[in-house]
Image (tube, rainbow, N blue to C red):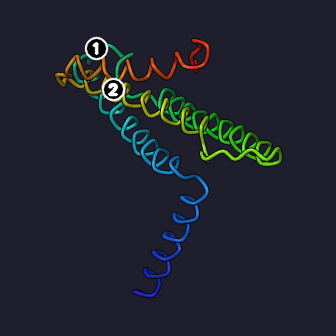
């Protein structure tokens, strides 16, 4: 059993090392994004349950598998957009390399999009916590929204939405 555990651990370490070498700074951001996606999904379910308890007479409140499925599909869409941004990064790096231009970053657009989605997930978690009855500091919501807005306004004032 220890041998299996060691093999899995060594394989995971090798995979993370390879991904880190290929993705650079993007890897930790993707790991954070994955964690925030899971936390957002869980807090969304808990917020729906809280609302259902507060409004037992109204069937529009509460957990709905259709909404839950739509949320998962939306998160898969986020990952697809990040993949597209990573492909754009790869194309730019390869074209620049062919032209003799060296670019130090391994990811720019992928990183920018991933961070934007992390901030999006953070805002959603804050909203879910408020729906659960938590007293959310206004400054926290504003600060995350300002960070997201800063990314939105980069690139000729056009956002990612």
Tell me the CA gap for discs 1 and 2.
14 Å
Q: Residues within 10 Å of mark 2 (few under 14, many from 20)?
A: many
Q: How many marks?
A: 2
* Horizontal arrangement in the rendering, residue 140 relative to residue 19 (left or right): left
Residue that carries the numbered disc 2 in the rendered image: 48
- Write the residue at 34% across / 30% down: 125
Of 62 and 56, the residue lying toward us:
62
Q: Secondary structure at mark 2?
A: helix
Q: Earlier in the sequence, mark 1 or mark 2?
A: 2
Q: Quadrant of the C terminus?
A: top right
Residue that carries the numbered disc 1 in the rendered image: 57
Q: Is residue 105 above or below residue 139?
A: below
Where does residue 33 sit, x and y in percent of width and height? 45, 41
* Horizontal arrangement in the rendering, residue 117 relative to residue 126 (left or right): right
What is the quadrant of residue 9 in the picture?
A: bottom left
- Write the residue at 50% across / 81% down: 7
Q: Kindly report which numbered mark, 1 or 2, lies closer to the viewer in this rendering.
A: 2
Of 19 and 47, the residue lying toward us:
19
């Amino acid at each position: 059993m220890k041998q299996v555990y060691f093999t899995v651990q060594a394989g995971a370490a090798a995979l993370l090392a390879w991904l880190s070498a290929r993705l650079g700074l993007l890897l930790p951001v993707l790991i954070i994004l994955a964690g925030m996606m899971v936390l957002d999904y869980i807090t969304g379910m808990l917020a729906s349950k809280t609302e259902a308890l507060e409004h037992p007479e109204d069937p529009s409140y509460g957990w709905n598998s259709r909404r839950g499925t739509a949320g998962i599909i939306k998160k898969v869409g986020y990952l697809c957009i990040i993949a597209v941004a990573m492909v754009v990064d790869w194309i730019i790096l390869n074209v620049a390399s062919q032209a003799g231009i060296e670019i130090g970053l391994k990811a720019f657009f992928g990183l920018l999009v991933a961070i934007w989605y992390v901030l999006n997930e953070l805002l959603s978690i804050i909203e879910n916590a408020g729906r659960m009855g938590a007293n959310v500091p206004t400054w926290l919501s504003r600060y995350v929204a300002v960070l997201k807005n800063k990314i939105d306004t980069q690139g000729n004032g056009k956002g990612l939405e």
